[in-house]
Image (cartoon, rainbow, N blue to C red):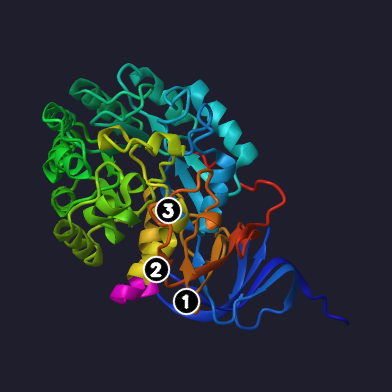
Amino acid sequence: MEMVRVKYDSLIKNGSVVFHDEVKKTNLAVKDGIVVEIGDDIDGEADVVWDAEGQYVFPGLIDVHVHFNEPGREDWEGFSTGSSMLAAGGCTTFFDMPLNGVPSTTDLEALQQKGKIGEEKSFVDFGLWGGLVPGNENDLAPLAEKGVVGFKAFMSPSGNKEFAAVDDNTLLNGMKTIAGLRKILALHAEDGTMVQFLQREKERQEKFGPDDYLQSRPIAAEWLAVRKAITFAEQTGCSLHFVHISSAEAVEEIQQAKKRGLDVTLETCPHYLLFDHEHTKKLGAVAKCAPPLRELSDQKKLVDLFLKDQIDFVASDHSPSPWSLKEDETNFFNVWGGISGGQFTLMAIIELSVRYRIPFPKLIHWTSARPAKRFGLDGKKGEIAKGKDADFVIISLKDSFTVEKNSLLQKHKHSLYVNHTFPCKIFATFQRGKLVFDNGRIRASKPLGQWLKL
């Protein structure tokens, strides 16, 4: 009797696969978007066969913090260009923030409008954050029911008139409601009173440079906001996630809260680990963000805590804008604050792993496993395992990658990372077994992304 060879959708052969506890040379077989076989002796045919000899196979990056600004500001970045950029960087799942679209995602109608656009345009899977702003407390339950990953609030001005910062009363009431909904509140933690006071002082003195901007958003403002939020959470029982933490002092405050039993996590961004304030002074507008890039001595403290595994995971905080919003050369305070870097999160963390000899299995906890667990996706994402989504990234450490403007897949071709050289190169990204990105180009014939309602 003639044996019938198994027909797979995709087959990854001879790759060094990064599992949660080891790196092992093996093969991966995919059927219907799921990893169905892992082993040396897989025998079958496939629509797509990738020979990963000499390459590493990582689980797809999960980026929980990006700004795609659609609807309303698609000219800044939209789901099509944004998800293409992320796919090029090995990201297979992202969470879009609620604030820069028009309307902001603070009610059910806005959520459904954004979700529909994402389903039509995104090349990779996505989730959507809802917003907590003054006056929308009654909208939180309907947003939770329809699957937002959590809620985002600002403790200082967001820079967007459509998305107001929370006052203490809104924050406390919102935390109580979010706790009851069993959701997570993500916080931009800088004390609004302090940063606005310090900015006014600089403006009164007619001091408008990068040094003045840094001094107007000190580590003390981040630490104070973190401590206040933790205190409020201890009173309300609200689960917290702190975004883009930039200082060791804030990390240590959060770790103390964890020891007291608070359900809290934190992320930092690659730009805080690779760059410092001297880069802001040298590169100017492309390096402005909030919180700002810190002085080298402070950055080293943050990196040290990262290496000691005191930071839960990394996220890009990809915050793009047209160059016209970056052009003010006389007043750094007026420059749009946001790093365009979503394409380079995974490569940046690999650079750190090479520099500090971090084992790859430990690395994927920061890039995929912990984000998946924190937001309830670990049943199907976050690691390479049988029965889970076939979200893969093919990476070579034999090749380096120097960022050029024409290699940026984002809408606007300016980034802090231009001219930076990474000690690795991403060759391919698979979304649920489908080849999305291949050696510099999007290969998917149509968007493949699914809206993950959590």
Which residue is painted at 48% across and 47% down in the image?
Answer: 94
Task: Point out which mark residue 397 bears.
Answer: 1
Of tags 3 and 2, the one toward the viewer is 2
Identity, as a three-letter code, of the amino acid under mark 3: Ala
**Along the horizontal axis of the image, is 181 left or right of 250?**
right
In the displayed structure, 248 sits above or below 338; it is below
Residue placed most toward the observer, 318 or 268: 318
Between the residue at mark 3 and the residue at mark 2, the CA separation in whole angstroms equals: 19 Å
How crowded pointer 1 is (Cα within 10 Å; few <14, some 14-19, many 20+) is rated as some
The magenta span reads: 353-360
How crowded pointer 2 is (Cα within 10 Å; few <14, some 14-19, many 20+) is rated as many
What is the x, y in percent for residue 168? 18, 24
Which residue is painted at 67% across and 79% down in the image?
Answer: 42
Say whether residue 182 is visible. no
Residue placed most toward the observer, 209 or 339: 209
Q: Element type at marker 3?
A: helix
Which residue is painted at 52% across and 21% down in the image?
Answer: 109
**Along the horizontal axis of the image, is 401 left or right of 331?**
right
Q: Is there a contact, CB below 8 Å, between mark 1 and mark 2? A: yes
What is the x, y in percent for residue 371? 39, 53
Identity, as a three-letter code, of the amino acid under mark 2: Ile
Identity, as a three-letter code, of the amino acid under mark 1: Leu
Between the residue at mark 1 and the residue at mark 2, the CA separation in whole angstroms equals: 9 Å
Q: Which residue is mark 3?
A: 372
Furthest-right residue in view?
A: 1
What is the x, y in percent for residue 76? 49, 36
Q: Earlier in the sequence, mark 1 or mark 2?
A: 2
Q: Which residue is mark 2?
A: 350
Say whether residue 370 is visible. yes
Q: Earlier in the sequence, mark 3 or mark 1?
A: 3
What is the x, y in percent for residue 365? 37, 63
